[in-house]
Image (cartoon, rainbow, N blue to C red):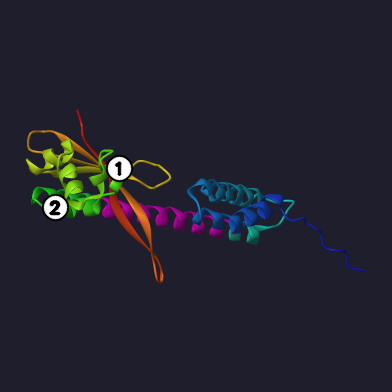
Amino acid sequence: MDEAPDYRPVSPLAVAAAVLGCCSAVALATPFAWFVPLVGVVAAVAALADLARPAAPRVGRLPALLGLALAVGFGAQAVSDAAVGRWIERTRAVATATAWLDAIHAGRPAEALGISSRSILPATGSPDAENETDQTDRFAALPAVKAVAGGRPTITSATPLGTDDRAWLVRATIDEGRVVRIIAVPRTAAKRRGGIERWTVTAVEVES
């Protein structure tokens, strides 16, 4: 009678690596889950190292390799998507700030006001505050607007603020060395066929 072949159990590490590899897809939804593919890679490498030992008491190379491939693939895609998304947001924030600065410097404050959120205007209790001409005059009187109108603004940096509204801080230097801080925020405007993202300037100030 032939002797029964030795039975070798599947490595728990290999199974864990395969499960973590599948779960690594959540990293595409949120940066807070980026640790999942990292743990998956560690588990897969540890499983493969354990299985590579001479006379290893367990099997499971295939699920370990599967987990490694999934973790690396989903992790790389998550990082790539985040990098591309950040680049797109920076480009739009700078473009919004540039349009705002150009309109003011060219003597078109009403156009710059159209790019701005109404919260940028100082509070007033006047009943004529909703008058378009009055709004433009109050906007043109803002210290940051005056500084831009009288100088040559050049954008020097753009950094995300890390807030829930995805706001970006754009800095522009004027001739005299003064710096104007511009907060640009994306807003989703409702359209007939879904929403469209429109960036606005929500706050401006001259750095002291």
Q: At x 28% / y 38%, what residue is drawn?
A: 125
Magenta stretch: give its range.
Answer: 67-93
Q: The residue under label 2 is which amino acid type?
A: Ala
Label whose residue precedes the other's in the sequence (2 or 1) = 2
Compare residues 161 and 206 and report the one nearer the observer. Answer: 206
Q: Secondary structure at mark 1?
A: strand
Q: Is residue 139 visible?
A: yes
The location of residue 60, given as percent across then percent down, is 68, 58
Magenta includes 206?
Answer: no
> Which residue appears at 27% of the width and 54% of the height?
91
Give me the disc on residue 103.
2
What residue is shown with label 1?
159
In the image shown, does 36 or 102 lie closer to the viewer? Answer: 102
Mark yes or no: residue 169 visible.
no
> Total of numbered circles in the picture?
2
Q: Position of residue 196 (x, y in %)?
A: 36, 63
Q: Which residue sits furthest right?
A: 1
Q: Tell which of 195 and 84 is nearer to you.
A: 195
